[in-house]
Each structure stands twice: as C-alpha cells, then as structure tokens.
Image (tube, helix red, strand yellow):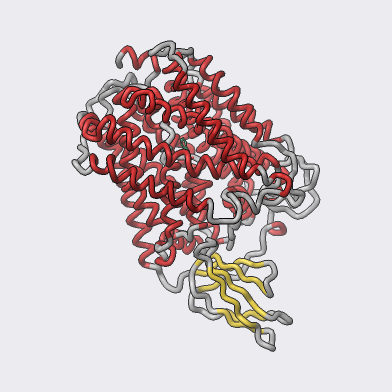
Amino acid sequence: MTGTQAKRGAWNSKLGFVLAASGSAIGLGNIVFFTSNAYQYGGGAFYLPYFVALFTLGIPVMILELGLGTLTGRSFPNALRQVGGRRAEMLGWWAIAAQFIITAYYVVIIAWAVSMMVGSLGSLFRPGVSAPFDPFREPATRPSAVTYFFHLVSTGWPLVALAAVWAINLFALRGGARTIEAMVRVFVPLMWVFMIGLIIRGLTLEGGLDGVLYLFTPAPEGIANAAVWRGAFAQMFFSLSLGLGVMTTYASYLPKKADQVANAFTISFLNCGFEYIAGVAIFALLFVFSLNPAGTTLSLSFFVVPQGIAAFPWGVRFFGFLFFLLVTAAGLTSSVSLIEGMVSAIIDKFGLSRGRALLVVSIPCALVSCLFVLPQIVDPGLAGNGTLGLTLLDLVDHWVFSYALITVGFVETLILGWVLGADKLRAAVNEHSRIPLGRWYEPFIRWGAPALLGVILVWSLAGEFTGETLYGGSTTPAGLKWLTVFIPLACLAGTVLVATILTRAAGKADEAPAGRGGAGGAAATLGAVALLVSGALLAPARAHAQDAPVIPARARVGEAVNLTLPGAASLTVTYRPNSSIARSVTLPVGSDGVVVWTPEQAGVVALAVDGGSSRNVSVRFAGIPWLGVLVLAAAGTILFGGAGYGLKRLFEGDDHAFPLDT
Ligand code: PHE
C-alpha cells in the first residue's frame, strides 16, 4: 500500500472490495426498481434488451469508472480534474450534487422498508388497519398492504425509521473503507441467503414456474417497442451504480495493481445475477397469487409482494419480515456507497477530517431527506401521491433518476474518450488486467457509448414534452401542480449552483488525513440480531386464511373458460400491464349470461365486468415455453458462470497488496 492510499483509506482485502462494490450495485434498484420495470415492460419483452444493455453499456462503462479510480487514486470530481481539468471537475461536482438528492430520497425508501419490516411483526399481516395508525395496535377493518403503507406514511413513524437509517449509515461510514468493509461482510452474504430463501418459497408454490418463465420468454411485440429499450438501458445504469462516480471512489481505495477488467465483470455479473434471482422470486409470487402491480414503482415491492406473502400457507410474518429486512440490507449497502462518494470527494478536495466531512455531508442531506417523509396528507383518498412527502419523492425521483446518471455517463465517456484519450485508458487498464481489453474498446468509448447514452437522453427528454403536462401533471393533487414545473427547475438550478461553487472553491489540501474509526463488530452484531429475530419468527404464523386475497381461477393459453355473469353485458380482458403494450379485448356476454373466454397470452390478466373493477387471473403457458426455458438457462449460466470465472481470475492474481490477503 502506498502512503497516499494509507492516508485516504484502503480496502483490507480483495474480497472486501468485491463485497462493497457489489453491495453498492445490489440495492433497491435490484429488488424494487428492476422487478417493477420488468413487469411494466412486459416481462420477457424487457429481459432481452436489459441483457443487451449489460454487455453494450454496463460492463464497458464499469471498466471506465473503475479504471478512472485506480488511475488517479482520487474520488470522482478530483479524478476528473486530474484527467480533464476544471471543466471536467465541474461534471464531477454536478454528479455529487445529484447524488446528494438521490441519497436524500433513497434513504427514505429504506426507512419505509424498515417501517414495513417492523410492521411485519406488528399489524401489517393482522386483519385490518385502523386510523390513527399504530403499527402495533390490532386494527379493526380489512387489511391490505396498500392501506397499511399509506397509513404508515401519513404518520410520524417513518421519521423514526429514517433517523435509524441515518444512524446505521454514519456508523458504517465512520472509518471509511475499513468500516464499510466490516458492514458488507455481514450484509452482503445475508442478502444472498435471504433472497435464495424467498426463491425456494416462491417456486415451491403451485404456478410459480409459469411466472418465472413469463419473465424470460421473449415477447416480440414488446421487444419492438422503443420505450422498452430505453427503460432497460436506464435500469442497467442505475443498477450498476454507474453515472455518479461511486465506483470510481470505491476503486480509488484499491492498490494500483488491481485488475479492473476482472473486477468489472465480477461486480456486474454478481449484480445482474442478484437481479435475476430477485426476478425469479418475485415473478413466481405474482403468478402464484395472480397479483397485478398497477401504478407506481413502489407498488410491487411495498404492496404486491406483501399481499402475496400474506397468502402463504405458513410463515407469513417470517417471510414478510425477511423480505423487508432483505430490502433494508440491500438498500443500506448502496446508501453507504452513495454517502461515501460525497464524503470522499469533500475529503480529497478540502482536506477535512473524515468526521467533519461526514457531518458536512450528512446533516444537510438528512434534513433534505425529512422532506420526503412529510406526513401531510395532500390526497384525502390516500392513493398514489397520498402525502406531501410521496408527491415530492415521485417528482424528484423522476427527474434526477432519469436524467442525472445518463447525463454524467454521456459527458464522462466523452471526457475519458477524447480528453484523456481512450487509448491511454485502455493501456492503463490493460497493464494489470489478466483479461486484456481489445482494440474495440477505444472506438467504443469515443463513439459508441456517448452515442448510445446521447440517444437515450434526447429521446427521454423529447418524451417529456409530448404530453399535455410535465411529468406528474395528472397525479399531483390540485393545489400542488406548480411543483411539477418547480421541481425540475429547482433540481437543475440547485445542482448547477452547487457544482459551480464547489468547483471554484479553493482546495485546501491534496491529501486527506487518515480516517478514524473502531472495529466493525457492531455491523456483525446487527446482522446476528437480525438473524435471531427472524429465527424466532420461524414458528408458523397464525392462520391467515380469512385475510388472504381470494385466489382467482387460473387459466391456460388456448383453453376456453366458461364464465357465467348473469345480468352483465360485457367482459373486458386486458393482457399485459404496460400502457404501451397493453391490449384489451371486450367480449359480449350472451343472453344466457355466459361468456366464453379463450386466453391468448400468458401473464397476469385483468378481467373486468361491464368496465367495473377488475379481477386478476394468471394465465399459464399452453405448453412448455421452450424459448423462455432457454433464456432462463442461458442467462443464469452466463451470469453465474461469469461471476464465478471473474472471482476465480481475481483471486488467483498475484497483487498481494492487501493487508488481509498477504
Ligand atoms: N445501484 C444501486 C441500486 O441498485 C443504486 C445506486 C446508484 C447506488 C448509484 C450508488 C450509485 O439500488
């Protein structure tokens, strides 16, 4: 380890870095956003473009961000300055400003998961929710995770959870790489174990496999849809933690000899492997219980999955708790990386001590995050954007999430490709890489990646102005419509202002003083407590038959279903949930009240009588969808084979510069 690295902090082991970087990548994006995007875009229609995005954009940009970190040994803005001067530095600070906003609401989603986790032990799975809300009180009315969630966010409870989330983050960050490493050594393996537990549960229930195959069976009409490709590329970028410089910061704590190609492959495959099993677990549930996650991004994880879990024959509270614990653990290992990215940038530029830098970043960020838990009810129906906090989160998320990362990626590839020079980057990376990067990498970074990102960017922006209002125009409550214009403008102006100030500010020191911090035993204790609590809950939960959703009839493609609907005039069948590829068929009901419906397509299909409220039916495939089986097997082999191969190459290397590896 060089003196510089000793001062800035450094990973103790290769494994520590791989866990931390994959822990950053695996987060809410893998469970909450991936599954809901995949569902919105029609399952198999999404998976192939997503897989293409991994190879055409994900891995090459991952190599670039990691390479920049070891090349310069600096966090993102400072690294960019080193390769491209002041103007490049400004891009880095702009990314940090966007990261500040993303962190502020990311921790709030974790806080909701914590609240739901506590609620699993309390009244989430008890019959009904009453107002005023109290997570431990036995409620009186009928239950649903949706009502539970909206009542929850309209109370002060999430604020308590938010305080806890910040406390855990600060605790894990107090010693920099060393204490982050201690945390991820506990949390990351736990996440994998929990997810595998959920998969086993989902697949052992009848009908689960059809849900899985639905996710992997390519649907030509969806693949031909441009929006699906855009969604898949944006999801890949966020999921791999690219476009904010987090990977650059994490890589800057590595020895110069680190093999960044092997790292990039390993981290990307581990991340997408986790997403693959999250998809398998959650899509199985959707089919088993015929659930249809309409509406917002959060709904799949926060409403639909708990609804499915509530219908389990046993272990309801255990699996409910486990699911939200999993979301929490995954979220925390990502939020830690988001905060570390900011803290490290401040330390590198201003030479503050770690403790001070942590306070400078987290106090304002924690205050801003309180905006997103504001319980003030703005929509008395408590739907969609029921509270002020939810309304703000929805708007901010739309603008920052969709544009910041891709914009940074676009400019960053241009800077590295042209200003530093793609040839220099490739040479630097190849110096220590056991899997050398071919010549293709240079034109790709110069032309290919910026072109791809530029197209996505322009195309998404153009889409914003095709509707009558800006994003949120129809969902934001009447008195708050001005926010739909104010939020994007405020985010843009605020981030540019902060970036300008921080770029111009004179840096005090080039090197940061050594970070302080104790052992990471507390993270281990936390994990152990979590395990104990979940173990205690293993005892079968009490019977939930009465509050489980009525399981609708299943159907199979091509097999006629006779429905008797006396007095009804029509039956509307809606295939696929995605607005751009949804298709409705209206069948007239005969005078005898009978209608014959022959399902045409697999999926969770909504049936509505006379345009009224709908009931879901999961339609299974007619035979075995071999194409889906093939994609399932091929994707699994590539992802897990790739991760295994990457790990093997990494650990057989001779760069014994890590204290724990020698
Ligand atoms: N990759 C993380 C997730 O999937 C989110 C994240 C994005 C974290 C960017 C750090 C930087 O949830």
Look at 69% across and 55% down and name the residue there: 544
- Residue 451: percent from left, percent from top: 33, 46
- Residue 73: percent from left, percent from top: 33, 22
Q: Quadrant of the C terminus?
A: top left
Q: Quadrant of residue 494?
A: top right
Q: Residue furthest bottom?
A: 591
- Residue 437: percent from left, percent from top: 22, 39
Look at 40% across and 66% down and name the residue there: 220
Counting the numbered discs, the total is 0
Q: Quadrant of the N terminus?
A: top left
Q: Quadrant of residue 406?
A: top left
Q: Is residue 174 above or below residue 199?
A: above
Please state which of residues 632 and 251 is positioned toward the viewer in this rendering: 251
Horizontally, residue 501 falls left or right of residue 271, namely right
Q: Is residue 127 above or below residue 520?
A: below
Q: Is residue 557 above or below residue 65?
A: below
Please state which of residues 262 and 13 is positioned toward the viewer in this rendering: 262
Look at 54% across and 73% down and name the residue there: 555
Please state which of residues 499 and 10 is positioned toward the viewer in this rendering: 499
In this view of the protein, can residue 81 be seen by the observer?
yes
- Residue 319: percent from left, percent from top: 58, 47
Horizontally, residue 38 falls left or right of residue 15, namely right
Horizontally, residue 139 falls left or right of residue 583, namely right
Look at 48% across and 13% down and name the residue there: 352
In this view of the protein, can residue 535 be seen by the observer?
no
